Image: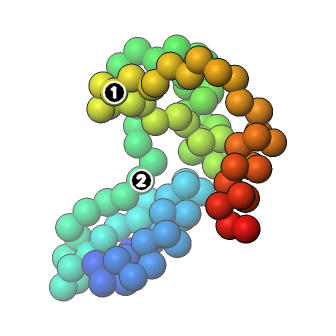
């Protein structure tokens, strides 16, 4: 368990989140009083074994879970197929 003040947490958030990913609990204090605890989330409800494994791999930093599209926007339909060389050439043409 690691204890950190609010100011230090704010200034070094990435470092403390790495500690959490490694399984540590981070206790947040303000004026020497505990105000929060940061830890790996506990999964509630029914989770399939595959989802469980994916979450575990994500917590270990081996994979990054996809974010869901919460905006409700649909991706545009692309009728023509583009290869990466064509796209790359178009981008580079702007710089020349």
Q: Is residue 40 above or below residue 77?
A: below
Q: Is residue 9 above or below residue 21?
A: below
Residue 40 visible to an observer of this rendering: yes
Q: Nearer the viewer, residue 96 or 33?
A: 96
Determine the CA span between mark 1 and mark 2: 33 Å
Packing grade of label 2 (10 A; few <14, some 14-19, many >=20) is some
| Label tally | 2
Residue at 34% across, 77% down: 10
Q: In the picture provided, is 88 more to the left or to the right than 39? A: right
Q: Which of the 4 image quadrants contains residue 71?
A: top left
Q: Mark 1 Cα within 10 Å, few/some/many (few <14, many 20+)?
A: few
- The residue that disc 2 covers is 39
Disc 1 versus disc 2: nearer the observer: 1
The picture places residue 44, in percent across and down from the top left corner, at 36, 26
Image coords of residue 63 (percent x, y): 65, 41
Left-right relation of 77 to 63: left
Compared across the picture, whether 26 is left or right of 94 comes to left
x and y, in percent, of residue 47 in the image: 46, 18
Tell me which label, 1 or 2, sits earlier in the chain. 2
Which element carries disc 1, helix, strand or loop?
A: loop
Name the residue rendered at 56%, 22% in the picture. 78
Which residue is at a point 32% across and 60% down the rendered structure image? 37
Q: Nearer the viewer, residue 46 or 54?
A: 54
Residue 57 falls in image quadrant: top right
* Quarter of the C terminus within the rendering: bottom right
Q: Which residue is mark 1?
A: 73
| Residue occupying the point 50% across, 19% down | 77
């Amino acid at each position: 368990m690691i204890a950190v003040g609010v100011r230090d947490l704010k200034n070094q958030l990435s470092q403390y989140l790495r500690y959490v990913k490694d399984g540590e609990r981070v206790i947040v204090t303000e004026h020497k009083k505990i105000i929060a605890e940061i830890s790996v989330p506990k999964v509630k409800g029914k989770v399939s074994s595959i989802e469980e494994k994916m979450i575990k791999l994500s917590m270990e930093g081996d994979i990054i879970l996809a974010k869901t599209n919460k905006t409700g926007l649909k991706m545009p339909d692309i009728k023509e197929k583009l290869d990466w060389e064509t796209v790359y050439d178009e981008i580079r043409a702007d710089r020349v």
